[in-house]
Amino acid sequence: MKNLSRRTVLRGALKGAGVGVALPFLNCFLDDSGKAFAGTGQRLPMRFGTWIWGCGFIPELWIPASTGTDYELPAHLLPLEPYRDRLALLSGFDVKLDGVPNKPHITGCFGLRTGIPVPDSNVKAPTIDVLVSDAIGRNTRFKSLEISTSGIQRSYSYRSAGSPNPSEISPIALYERIFGEGFQDPGAASFKPDTQDMIHHSVLSAVSDDRHRLMNVVGAEDRARLDEFFTSIRQLEQQIALQLEPPAPIENFVKPDAPPQLTLDSEMGNVMETHRIMAGLLAKALQCNQTRVFNVLFSDTTSNLRRPGTTTTHHTLTHEEPLDPELGHQREVAWFARESMVAWREFLDELAGIPEGDGTLLDNCLVLAHSDCSIAKAHAVEGIPTMIAGGGGLLRTGVHLAGKGDPISRVGLTVQQAMGLQVERWGSLSMETNRTITELLS
Amino acid sequence: MIVARSVLPSCMTRKIRLSVCFSIASICLAGALNGCNSADETLAEPTPVGGPPLMRRLTESQYRATIADIFSAEIPIAARFERGVRADGLLAIGTSEAGMSPFSIEQYDAAARSVASAVVSEQWRKQLVPCRPQSETVFDEGCATAFVEHYAPRLMRRTLSTQELQPYIELVRRGHRQLDNFYEGLKFALIGMMMSPEFLLRIENTEPDTEMPGLYQLDDFSRATRLSYFLTNSTPDSELLRAAAAGELKTREGLAGQVDRLIASPRFEDGVRAFFTDMLEFELFDDLAKDPVIYPAFNSQVAAEAQEQILLTITDQLIGRNADYRDLFITRDTYLTRDLGIVYRLPVATRKGWEKSEFPQDTGRAGIHTTIGFLALHSHPGRSSPTLRGKAIREVFLCQEVPDPPPNVNFSVVQEPTSTNMPTARDRLEEHRTQAACAGCHKIMDPLGLTLENFDGLGAYRTRENGAPIDSSGSLDGTEFNTAEGLAQALHDHPETPRCLVEKMYRFAVGRDTVWEERPYMDYLVKMFEAESYRVPELMRTIVLSRNFFAISGVRQYGGEFQNAGLNIPMEETP
């Protein structure tokens, strides 16, 4: 066993069999690498997240001219230069509509995240982050954390059509939820379980005792909803159970201070500031294992970002701004598209700013960044810009891959497999695929 | 079990989807205008159809009202509720489909803890704990039982057997034992009740209909709950629970007595407000942003007061004056605060709070759709939008669904709003007419919205845009006008206006979309509404007194039999 590299196993499992298999952390391999162990001797967990920005990109300013590793960074990716080696750029992967009406800014986003195109927000399958959190998020305090930084109270994390996971839009509320009541500071000098928590835990167990009786009195559809109710109750039980145990020590962790009161709206300067602060809090939450899954909505898919004193938002501009004859693209739209990449860089800065093991938190995160469309003006869902950051050696980075019109569900499939999910094929109709993106396997 | 049902032909086409409007706008509008010419002129209720029993989540306002009614309006609820799910145009229908994310449970738990802590606190226990324990440190079984017997039926909206009460009494015992404090025991028992699915969800139970073989109906307590949340947006009060337990809601007289009592009560206003808050999509205000440079008068206070202004007008008109529903589109009566007065440029003498006022005739402002609660909500952050406003009028007030724009449209011809070539929205939108792909739908939306162009993106009156005079002429389904008042009158007179209200009100009441077989019933409600001179309280009364309101069908909406709640269905265990 000691002669095997983890890489060999991954490649063999994925390429050879042609089917997805779980890619667990194998202790013996990780031990060899020495990277996956924190100073405390505990294994460092892998985290998964998504980062969404709205209204796509300017293709000629974003897609590198060549594929592989030796590409030149185009203008809008220049802000990401420091992370060039930590990013996989994916261009040319399509949401396949199969005749489903393209609801602007919605169909593309959910198509990418569920592998199934829908003409509205009525998703037909859980979004990819929910699938991953079901697999890796059960033992942390929060199954996942959602944040939205432009004042829009929504997320693109759905268990089912009626069950979105709402986003936190206020840094203060986010701080209170993570670091307020119920937070166990790993740096605290002593630990004493609270008797209140013990009773609280048994109250919730008592609630679950009603499960069997109630499941018998509702119809089949409501049974699924009721099941979700009791699953969420169990998650809360788990949260309280964690409070009854001393927190595991975390290297280099210092509890953050409460954030200042900010103006929460869609003006770009305010959004950038809100995003930076919320990303910092999220990174801290990841560091001390409050959650392993997150979803960030930098700007909504119909981006309401705006510059102060202007009459028109980013989204409206994509439709109404004329092409600049000299530039060949929409000047204002390009400004928002580039700033979105600056925000993405700042997000990575927060993850990379936290030391973990002999690397950083970013090394132990796999973040899927994507938009809802490619060319917003036409609401095109072909070639939606997508990136994978970090990846902890599970996936190859520093590379640009062209999808050449392949279904974008290949990205979702590969990411799930990298996160250790037992999934062989994913998506439906033209988006159903069992084709792992093998070029991403390191 | 399929019930023989009247198959009266009906011309009713509900939820007119204007999907063919790209090419043949005029035809679908003609359809909308058709009205109904059913031969059936009597006002007898058709054979009940009903729908499946539902499991509905309490909305935030229902949760808050319920806590206020059961405990006290002053009990703090320390939780952040997520936004409801809108389905088939209503949050009320979304409550039948909404799931329960970990976030929701976390927040309900926080709410339950804050309420329970307050209830047993020294400040409140005298008033809210129905008995005095012998001592705080000794377990008092009698008091524990009295507490649970008092609150469990109220919270779960039904009577509970001794056996069902027992686990909560046990929680008191356990809490007391571990914390050595009786009130702490009560607190945790209360948290348990408030986390029960039977409190957080309205799980409807059914029983066979004794009069209509093959049909099912709601049981007594599910009736009380459906009735109460519809008419008062809150939990059944003790009198209604008593009537339910006594079987009185199954008799016409018993039901009518309770309905009249609730409609006459001050809580009825909360039911009316809840409906219009849902219909007018006020939750969109949570996301509403206005550019502070362009609209310095806008802030969160103005946003909140803009909604309240509409609701005050509605309750004053519909309940206070028992006015015709359609008057909401023409009335110039309104309510103002100082902050709103700044936007409307009207003097407000009252320093704090509301005062009755009237919109002056010269601005053409008439009807709730000309208040900023509508105009600002359906605009862009930095300018007005005739298209968004036209779309909202179609969808909110006329129940006509306007399709999304085709994905691949070049809007750039619509140009920048500050362009000197096209100073007004009308100039810019004119361009749409030259594009076939746009023309159909924009013809349906823009003429309505252009009439409101004298109101800017916040709703303030103006006569010019970018220096050019504004032409506010427009039309609605064949009626031409050139002022906002003309639009107001056209909305008042539109045959779809009352029908749309009836439809939304019924769907709101039962928490689901109407089914095909309910068309004769909807016709019946529309005729009753007309016969009652479009009085909304009467419409609500007609709905709750109709047999269809409590009827449960044996057939699901999308075919297939539902598994009746009263039967014992084998359950698949989920791991």
Image (cartoon, coloured by chain):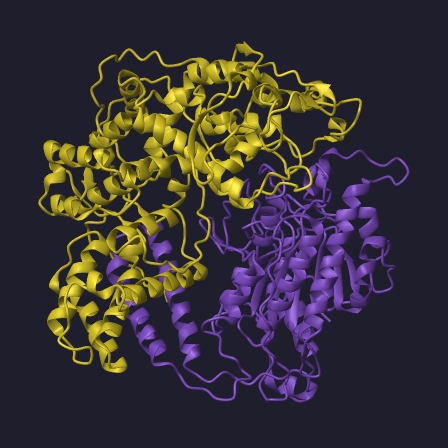
Chain colours: A purple, B yellow
Comparing A302 with B558, the one in front is: A302
Please tell me in which quadrant of the rendered image residue B323 appears. Answer: top left
Q: In this view, does B340 lie to the left or right of A350?
A: left
Give the percent coordinates (x, y) of residue A155.
55, 53
- Which residue is outermost to the left? B246
Residue A438 seen: no
As drawn, B190 above or below B504: below
Give the percent coordinates (x, y) of residue B54.
30, 45
As drawn, B13 above or below A80: above
Residue lying at 46% horizontally and 18% vertically, measured from the top left? B491
Comparing A115 with B518, the one in front is: B518
Q: In this view, does A426 lie to the left or right of B562?
A: right
Q: How many marks?
A: 0
Q: In which quarter of the image is the C terminus of chain B?
A: bottom left
As drawn, A203 above or below A127: below
As drawn, A183 above or below A81: below
Comparing B167 with B275, the one in front is: B275
Give the percent coordinates (x, y) of residue B104.
42, 58
Residue B258 seen: yes
Q: Quadrant of the N terminus of chain B?
A: top left
Residue lying at 21% horizontally and 26% vertically, measured from the top left? B47
Q: In this view, does B247 lie to the left or right of B449?
A: left
Give the percent coordinates (x, y) of residue B571.
28, 59
- Which residue is outermost to the right? A326
